[in-house]
Image (cartoon, helix red, strand yellow):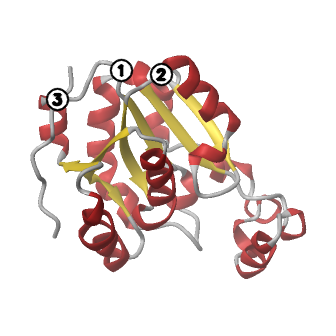
Amino acid sequence: MTNSSPLHEPLPDDTLHVVVDMQQLFDSHPDWGSPALRRILPNVQRLVRHRPERTVYSRFVPPHEAAEALGRWRRYYERWPGVCLAACGEHYVELLPELQAEAEKGWIVDKPVYSAFQAPAFIEILETQRPSCLLFSGVETDMCVLSTLLVGVDLGFRAVVARDAVASARPEAHEATLSVVLSRLDAQIEFADTGTILANWR
């Protein structure tokens, strides 16, 4: 297990909390649902409630059917036809009910791919809010969280990962991402548990 390390400094007032894909799709869908999401939900809620007006929620939105997907994404959805909206219904795109009330105080952005930076609405939020620090929670550590996080690092944002508020359906991939992949970027990415983050967030 990756241990929390001290934050480089307190989180600034302009921090933007990016809650990645805390949706029905990754909770209860028969193909992609996982108990991992429910395990981190209490910590995600603690972070959200601290600064709901500084929170943006990404939602992963599959195509209506595989034939509509771009390039190799079509092959991907041919493997997972049950998550296409024609098969499962659009309700799976919704955030968890426990987050919906707080989400009204922040922002929701939809993306068709792993990284939230591919959502024009997300870029608009960054341009208007001008955060210097991005705080990450959500699922899945080794996929959408990782993809969004690395683009943030490339763009020079201070990046903080709430270690006990990210998860994956594959625990071994979650651990490898935190302890092997992201630990190599320790000058740019900080890890801390939810309690430490809340104690150091203005």
Q: Decide: marks 3, 1 in contact (CB < 8 A)?
A: no
Q: Residue 64, percent across and down?
A: 83, 58
Residue type at the position of mark 3: Pro
Q: Decide: marks 1, 2 in contact (CB < 8 A)?
A: yes
Q: Residue 45, percent across and down?
A: 32, 37
Which element type, helix, strand or loop, lies under badge 1?
loop
78 versus 119 height, above or below = below
Q: In which quadrant of the rendered image does the N terminus lie? A: bottom left
Residue drawn at (12%, 30%) of the image: 199
The label number, if any, that marks residue 10 in the structure image: 3
- Whole-angstrom CA distance, mark 3 to mark 1, is 11 Å
With 68 as the anchor, is 3 left or right in this view? left
Hey, which quadrant is residue 14 in on the image?
A: top left
Q: Residue 102, percent across and down?
A: 44, 26
- Provide the residue designation for mark 2: 130
First along the sequence among labels 1 and 2: 1
First along the sequence among labels 3 and 2: 3
Which element type, helix, strand or loop, lies under badge 2?
loop
Residue type at the position of mark 1: Asp
Residue type at the position of mark 2: Arg
| Most foreground residue, 61 or 39 | 61
Q: Residue 129, percent across and down?
A: 50, 19
With 138 as the anchor, is 84 left or right in this view? right
